[in-house]
Image (cartoon, rainbow, N blue to C red):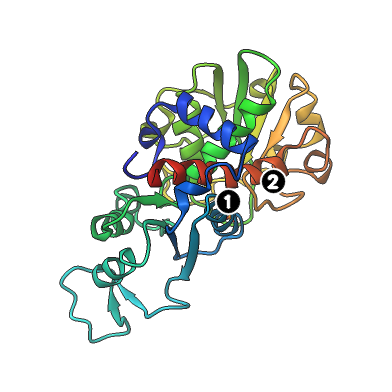
Amino acid sequence: MKNFTSFADAGDYKALLQQALEIKANPYGYQHIGRNKTVGLIFFNPSLRTRLSSIKAAYNLGAQAWVLNAGADSWTLEMADGAVMNGGTQEHIKDAIAVMSQYCDVLGVRTFPSLTNRDEDYQEVVFNKILQYATVPFISLESATLHPLQSFADLITVAETKQKERVKVVLTWAPHVRALPQCVPNSFADWFSEIDWVDFVITHPEGYELAEQFTKGARIEYDQQKAFKGADYIYAKNWSSYRDYGQILSSDPAWMVSEAHMALTDNGKFMHCLPVRRNVVVTDAVLDSPNSLIIQEAGNRTISMQTVLHELLK
Ligand code: CP
């Protein structure tokens, strides 16, 4: 593994998953890997889980970690090549990333999409610029289109809880009050459409189709209740429209995941990446039920990051 930005970078996902389960069983058993190493974490956007689990993962591996909240803690960064910097920006991203690469052995970056310019977001213009200037291995802490550390943690969570050889996993759109990126569902589809022991189904209202480069021919079911029937895992997430880019096309509360929805499943487990707006996306009763995996899933964010760091630093 050279960088970690998508499912493709995982290489042999079965081997990576096995490594993750071994790290989870023995979290401090690989401290020689991180000795005298530093993990740099740059956030252009807010975070709770990604930030803290990445620091914890570094510590578990015997490494140190630093965090920079770009813009808030640093100079205001200029992104445009060839810019005449006589305005509000104070340091060019080219210089900042080259400098910060000298202060770490692996660099993680979070950059959210604008949700206003689909071409720019889906070409990962900002993210690729940073990748271009980084001189150390690179980890996506969530880009404009993908959140691979989350999806890897989701895969670990399903793998360690599944009761059957094959499982039906349903990604369901759910309502929200704000327009959210497609990163988490794109990434979930990018990963789960490739897992050979998963029957993967996506359900959403019409107009919320995700980019085909990530759904890769996965079954799409517009009837949410039909999709839920017999499911072993329900993964809920809101996203704004890819077709009508960044728009909210529906806020239909009938799509909020409730106990009645979960009753259609085969005693299905509930998952969400968090943060979640309770009683908008999913009811308290589902989130707080014994079948809810949300806390275990968030815990596995440390394991996914630790496994990726292990691969990049070893
Ligand atoms: N799931 C997730 O990435 O959480 P944060 O945005 O809090 O990091």
Residue in front for this viewpoint, 167 or 101: 101
Tell me which amino acid carries mark 2. Answer: Val
Q: Is residue 63 left or right of residue 87?
A: right
Tell me which amino acid carries mark 1. Answer: Asn
Q: Is residue 107 left or right of residue 148?
A: left
Residue at mark 1 = 60
Q: Residue at x 63, y 51 (%)?
A: 176
Does residue 37 appear in the picture of this structure?
A: yes
Dot 2 lies on which element?
loop
Q: Is residue 177 positioned above or below 94 on the image?
A: above
Q: Residue at x 37, y 80 (%)?
A: 75
Residue in front for this viewpoint, 85 or 100: 100
Query: Dividing the image into 4 quarters, which one contains the C terminus?
Result: top left
Disc 1 to disc 2, C-alpha distance: 33 Å
Does residue 224 appear in the picture of this structure?
A: no
Where residue 198 appears, as percent x and y from the top left, is 55, 19
How many numbered marks, from 0 up?
Answer: 2
